[in-house]
Amino acid sequence: MKGDYLENLDWPEAESLIKQDRVVVLPLGAASKQHGLHLPLNTDALTAQYLADRIAEQHDVIILPLLAYGYYPAFVEYPGSISLQKKTFEDTVIQIFQSLHQQGASKFYVLNTGISTHWGLEPARQSLLADGVIMDYSDFTAMLEELEQDISEQPLGSHADEMETSMMLFMYPDKVQQDKAVPELMPRLGPGPFTRDRQASHGIISPSGGWGDPTLATRKKGEAIICTLVERIGHAIEMLASDACDPPPPRTEYLG
């Protein structure tokens, strides 16, 4: 184990590690967000912590306690799904990192498992950068684009789908109720949230809450996905740790 978990330290130990200028990693994953009929509400939280543990095995980082709430407005129609307002989420991330920056940390990485969270993370990154604090975050869609083209069989999807269900079959097979998995292949009807309203004129109509075909998921696909994410997250963290590297350029698509 190369990494350290902040929550397991006493404050003098934390002080010593923080002043070593190590990259601080914040796992971010919803602990209460619908994931179809076959996956638990804490799927994102389980994924974020699993990946953080894998990163801690291989990299000299400080792992923060999981942030289990974020900006997830697309799912709130489904009971159990919780979303913060975007500005609340943005400010939460900023204040977590500002607290540690005042204690000596200067480089931060959000191990982000969401999509809508990008719209809070990028403004937070720009605000922190203006104060001399360097932060980066993971974008699973970009990290997995090539692999998805190679292994995915579903025609569309992005939530509780073939890819995400495959990940869970590899990480936590006992938490997947695959007999309840159903395909949801209605094309997106323009901008808007997920909805159970079959008469909706926008968004994604999904009675189950998923989007894609989780019945195509396999453990083997999940292993390939997880290995790719561990490698690419690790590379991003190493780049962040390198003093020779400039901060990542603005991701303007998430600043609108």
Image: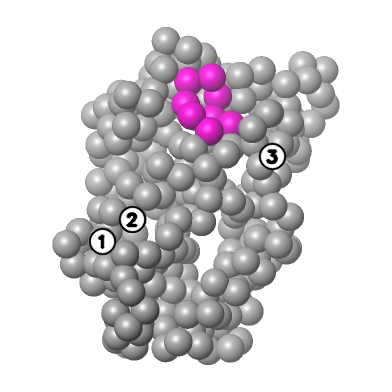
**Amino acid at circle 3:** Ala
**Are the residues tagged 2 and 3 within 8 Å (C-beta)?**
no
For residue 56, the mark is 1
Q: Magenta includes 35?
A: yes
Identity of the residue furthest to the left in this view: 1
Give the image's coloring scheme.
one colour
- Which is more toward the observer, 233 or 103? 103
Q: Is residue 145 above or below residue 125?
A: above
**Amino acid at circle 1:** Ala
Res 120 → quadrant? bottom right
Which secondary structure type mostly characterizes the magenta part of the structure?
Answer: loop
**Are the residues tagged 1 and 3 within 8 Å (C-beta)?**
no
Q: Earlier in the sequence, mark 1 or mark 3?
A: 1
Which residues lie in the magenta part? 34-41
Q: Magenta includes 149?
A: no
Q: Badge 2 is on which residue? A: 52
**Are the residues tagged 2 and 1 within 8 Å (C-beta)?**
yes
For residue 74, the mark is 3
Of helix, strand and loop, which one carries label 3?
helix
Of helix, strand and loop, which one carries label 1?
helix
Q: Residue at x 79, y 31 (%)?
A: 202
Task: Give the distance between the C-alpha atoms of the residues marked 1 and 3, in whole angstroms.
Answer: 31 Å
- Which is more toward the observer, 163 or 43? 43
> What x and y, as percent, mark residue 26?
44, 63
- Please state if 153 lies on the left or on the right of 171 as rendered: right
Q: Residue at x 55, y 24 (%)?
A: 36
Task: Give the distance between the C-alpha atoms of the residues marked 2 and 3, in whole angstroms.
Answer: 25 Å
> What x and y, as percent, mark residue 111?
43, 58
Instruction: Give the quadrant of the N terminus.
Output: bottom left
